[in-house]
Amino acid sequence: MKVSLFITCFNDTLFPQAGQATVQLLERLGHTVEFLEEQTCCGQMHFNTGYQREALPLIRRFVKIFGQAEVIVAPSASCVGMVREVYPLAAEWLGDQTLLAEVRALAPRVYELTEFLTHRLGLEDVGAYYPHRVTYHPTCHSLRFLHVGDAPLRLLRAVRGIDLVELPGAAECCGFGGTFAVKNADTSLAMLGEKVRNVLSTRAEICAAADTSCLMQIGGALHRQRAGVRTVHIAEILASTEEGSPA
Amino acid sequence: MSETLKGHPQPTFQAGARAALGNAQLRRNLYKATSTIRAKRARVVEEMPDWEELREAGRALKEEVLRHLDTYLLELEASVQQAGGQVHWARDAQEANTLITQIASIHGAHEVIKVKSLTTDEIGLNRALAAQGIAAIETDLAELIIQLAGETSSHILVPAIHKNRAEIREIFLRKLQVDSLTDEPRDLTNAARLHLRHKFLTTPVAISGVNFAVAETGTVCVVESEGNGRMCITLPRVLISVMGIEKVIPTWQDLEVFLQLLPRSSTAERMNPYTSLWTGVREGDGPQEFHLILLDNGRTRVLADTVGRQALNCIRCSACLNICPVYERTGGHAYSSVYPGPIGAILTPQLLGVEQAGTLPYASSLCGACYEVCPVKINIPQVLLYLRGRVVRQKQRAGGLRERANPEQLTMRLMARTFANRTRYERAQKLARSGQWPFKHGEVIEKLPGALGNWTILRDLPAVPRQSFRDWWRERSTTEANHKEEQE
């Protein structure tokens, strides 16, 4: 299958390793990956912060760039949620019927990586090897907006060598919430505190998730506390084999 | 809302949250109460095979009501009048308070007893009555506790959720003139019972809210757990019920849906303990005079908004408060409104106007838990997003030059311009990489200036890496192309 990678501006700029792992994994599974270099940002930060008129050109731009793609895959549940759940609302609220039709045609072809692997390709064992103790944080957008269910956990359970430990209070938000983390920093940190305590209680060396944004929040505190726990995008785990980890 | 006059901006959520987050006793009380009720609710909802159908039925009924609100309200008015009740229409809080005060005064009341009611809190009824020399006595145990403590409610259903029993014992010892009291729930309840029983038997006027009012029959329904509401509704000679106009439902049969949804969502009970239903007046049985006040107070404005109006579906169960990770930590007072939590964050700014409560739509990480538990499927995250859009537009319109120079506005406009063009975007990536050196400490950034400093209070930030994904992609493509050429 020809997969068009929606890298997200966040991963492109701050977490390129999540994108690289996605490419390596999809290629290893026999798919052709294309990267449309015109892509920038889906507009989520603007839209969610209330700058919705400002987000509209970014939405139109995204639809134009990816309009012809057969399937679009992103290593981010929250950006996929933006395209699939929020783009139609945006078009509706701003009264653009043409855009609404385009968005509705595009949305079903946009997948978050783990749901693409499980729901679309029907895979669980992707042939990965990862000899580490890992706990998994299922992000709010993957759980409650995309409804990926236990897809990421099924993928992780099939990884050879992994010591997967359940995260207590897994479904609760880490407190990131985009600009919420800055606008309501005190509350965000109070939420993060509990998430970090739960991560530490698992004695895992790695906390994984399908969103680097949530991982930046959790990892930011873990690093500040010198907790000795790393955050890793699930793509990096799934891309790892006996031959080595992704670049 | 009752504590803040209309026309004065509400205190920001941030300020309220900061105060609450530092209160260890409050944090402990909230955690204990919300986690207990969350777990119980999950259990009693799970056992219902048709829960999703019920939710959908509840939503559909509410939507039907809102679409034909005028018709159902007129039908309700006629039914209540036919059953011997009197119906009054109140445009706002002031009109409602004047009406109620007048009715109480006519009967020479110096005291009135009250059934727990959010709507009367919303209009600040107790203060309005006090101004006319009428004391309002709260009879719901938790409402009584906070009334005696001189505080305001912090939860829709459990107004004193922020208090533990040791604190309640202190309040009762101070205010109820009892000599000795343990902090056992039974003891505390008995103290309140002795205090209230006398009031039930001697006070001539009672005031209640309304959970549901059936248009078809004129029946009014109040749902409660203690039976104190039942006392108020049956013992006094005069009963005044105040309802937001959205509380009307079409038929008696529709109660079937809501009386299943509400108790499981609110108190996590299979069936509600005291469900009182009455239709007008009946000679020799119960109150001989019944007044129903239909209150607008901003609701028709909410109704006019096609996206925001779903907030009026709310049946005040408080499941969204109990599940909300923000509410669990800040409690209700941070929202500065009778309606706290996720539902309050979408209702308060709509009732008061977004310019009055502009920080509330941002009091959420958009985690979506509230929508999942809402028994009438109010898409709270969606309405939060929508209201954020209205807050920003309102600021942009009203703010003039000062707002245009606001750092957030400037940053957002600049970033939108950057993201709209690939060349500018790639240039910005390079700029971030080369410009971060004053802040970089190894592979992380530990301190940032301005608003971004809020990030680095307790969190490190990864430094922008040497190579972006697109740089890597290009490099790889070039290497691959060269490799191919060599092979050929």
Image (tube, coloured by chain):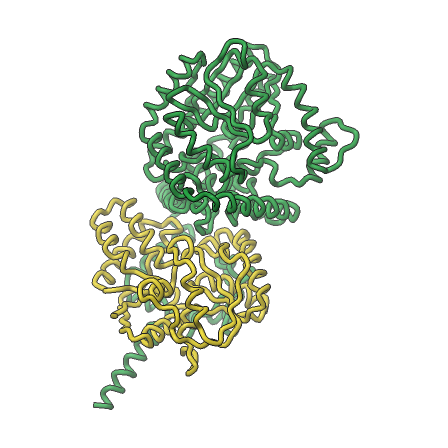
From the viewer's perspective, tell me whether residue B412 is left or right of residue A226.
left
Q: Is residue B77 left or right of residue A57?
A: right
Q: Position of residue B330 (x, y in %)?
A: 56, 46
Vertical placement of residue A52 versus A233, above or below:
above
Please say if B456 is above or below B277: below
Residue at (38% x, 68% y) in the render: A124
Position in image of residue B220 (x %, y %): 46, 22
Q: Within the image, what quadrant is residue B391 found in?
A: top left
Which quadrant would the C terminus of chain B be assigned to in this image? bottom left
Q: Position of residue A9 (x, y in %)?
A: 36, 64
Chain letter for the yellow part: A
Q: Is residue B468 visible?
A: no
What chain is colored green? B
Position of residue B295 relative to residue B184, above or below, is above
Tell me if residue A51 can be seen.
yes
- Give the residue furthest to the bottom: B487
Residue at 57%, 57% (x, y): give it: A194
Which one is nearer the viewer's eye here, A33 or B346? A33
The image position of residue B21, as x and y in percent, is 59, 49
Is B482 on the left-hand or right-hand side of B312? left
**Residue at 23% across / 64% down in the picture?**
A69
